[in-house]
Each structure stands twice: as structure tokens, then as C-alpha cells.
Amino acid sequence: SYVLTQTPSVSVAPGKTARITCGGYNIGDKSVHWYQQKAGQAPLLVISYDKDRPSGIPERFSGSYSGNTATLTIRWVEAGDEADYYCQVCDSNCDLPVFGGGTKLTVL
Amino acid sequence: QVQLVESGGGAVPPGGSLRLSCAASGFTFSSYGMFWVRQAPGKGLEWVAFIRDDGSNEHYGDSVKGRFTISRDNSKHAVYLQMNSLRGEDTAEYYCAKSSDYDGSGYLDYWGQGTLVTVSS
């Protein structure tokens, strides 16, 4: 089964740039989607198909690839960005989703 | 706007059963696949069941296969999760989520607020 690996935690000061990574075999061949989950809330889609932002998601959020790693970049980080972030791709047959283990973003 | 509202969660002893419901509105329900995704306390996201737009195909996560059944009623804009033989490890917040497409190959673009299931004696 396809496995996505995320760093468990990332810390960043307000106003700086946070980079949250998601690793997987040949992940560049897949479309990556990103979700934000704030404490006590349901997940929220923030990036679809690698780099598309749904309506209402600030331009500070962007997605990219490099090698076997996808990256969610959050520029000018705010306290309100503190959350767990999950990456997701479709599985080996591209029938169903696979989620990464999540990264907790702490804003210092 | 899209709304997904779950109900039916609660406390149940091991071996018991529970039926979750999700009422959908704000989109053409019969055109999209639907998921149930759960999150155990302090853990990550785990999809447990998926049903295609027309109900013709279902998929289950390995941890619930043979115990859980997903169904939908397109006339009522609702999706259900029948959970039998519940175990302690099924304790979680259960989210209803809309697929971006008729199948499960895309992303989950809208999520409900969740309903908590607690399995304990």
C-alpha cells in the first residue's frame, strides 16, 4: 500500500515562512492535496491538485514538488495558521485516498 | 453553500452497533461519491468507507471490513454508516466528507463537523 510520510511537527515564528513536507515514492506522479485541521474543528481543504487554492484560502498558502517530496508553504505565518496539516494522494490504483500522518504546525 | 451534518454518534459497549447518518445539502448529491473518515483521539485521519455517486460501488478500510456498511439514499440526500461488532479501537470522531468526483480518486472538498463514537464498557 502507498505510504505518505510527514514530519510530525514544525515550529515557526509569526511573519516567517513555514514549509510542511510530504514524502512518498514517485509522489511527483500523483496529485497532492492538503488539508488544515485546527483544534476541535473538521479538516479544511487548503490546496488541491498540487497547487490550486479553493475559494477563500489566502494566497499565502501554496503547494509545490521537488523530487519525492511535496511541500505546503505558508508565507507570512499568522497565529491563526496553527493547526495540523495533512497531505493526501490517491492510492496505487488511484481508487481511494491515502493520508499522511499529519504535521502539527506551532506558531511561536 | 455545501453542508454536511452528521448524527447518530454516542456511547456504546463493545460488541454493540450504531448507525451514523449524514444529511447533505447545497450540491447535486447524486453526482458525487461520499466518504466516512474517522479520527481517533490524538491521531490522524483514516478513511473507513466510501460509496460511489450512484451507490453501485463501495469500499472499506481494512480495519472495518466485514463490520461496517455504508449506504446512501439519493432521494433523501443522505449517506449512512452502519457499524456492527464495535471495538474499543473504533472510538473516534466520525466525519462525513464529499468526494470531489463521482468516485474516490480525487480529494475531499467538504467535511461535516463530525459525530463522536465512544466504545466502552
Image (tube, coloured by chain):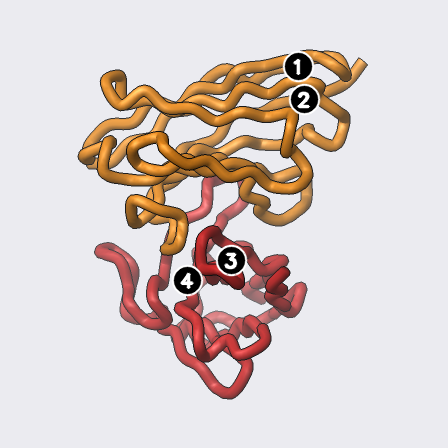
Chain colours: A red, B orange
Q: CA distance from mark 3 to mark 1?
A: 31 Å
Report which residue position mark 3 lands on.
A82
Quarter of the image that includes the N terminus of chain A: bottom right
Q: CA distance from mark 2 to mark 3?
A: 27 Å
Q: Which one is earlier in the sequence, the residue at label 4 or at label 3?
A: 4
Q: Is residue A88 visible?
A: no
Q: Is residue B113 visible?
A: yes
| Amino acid type, residue under disc 4 in the picture | His
| Side of B78 where A72 appears, left or right | right
Which secondary structure lies at badge 1?
strand
Labels 2 and 3 positioned on one and the same chain: no
Task: Spot the residue most to the bottom.
Answer: A67
Report which residue position mark 2 lands on.
B118
| Side of A1 where B56 appears, left or right | left
Q: CA distance from mark 1 to mark 2?
A: 5 Å
Report which residue position mark 1 lands on.
B11
Residue at image coords 58%, 66%: A108
Which of the chains bears the disc numbered 2?
B
Report which residue position mark 4 lands on.
A33
| Amino acid type, residue under disc 2 in the picture | Thr
Q: Is residue A24 above or below residue B61?
A: below
Across and down, in percent, residue A75 comes to 39, 75
Q: Residue A24 lies in what quarter of the image? A: bottom right
Q: Is residue B39 above or below residue A52?
A: above
Q: Is residue B58 above or below residue A9?
A: above
| Amino acid type, residue under disc 1 in the picture | Ala
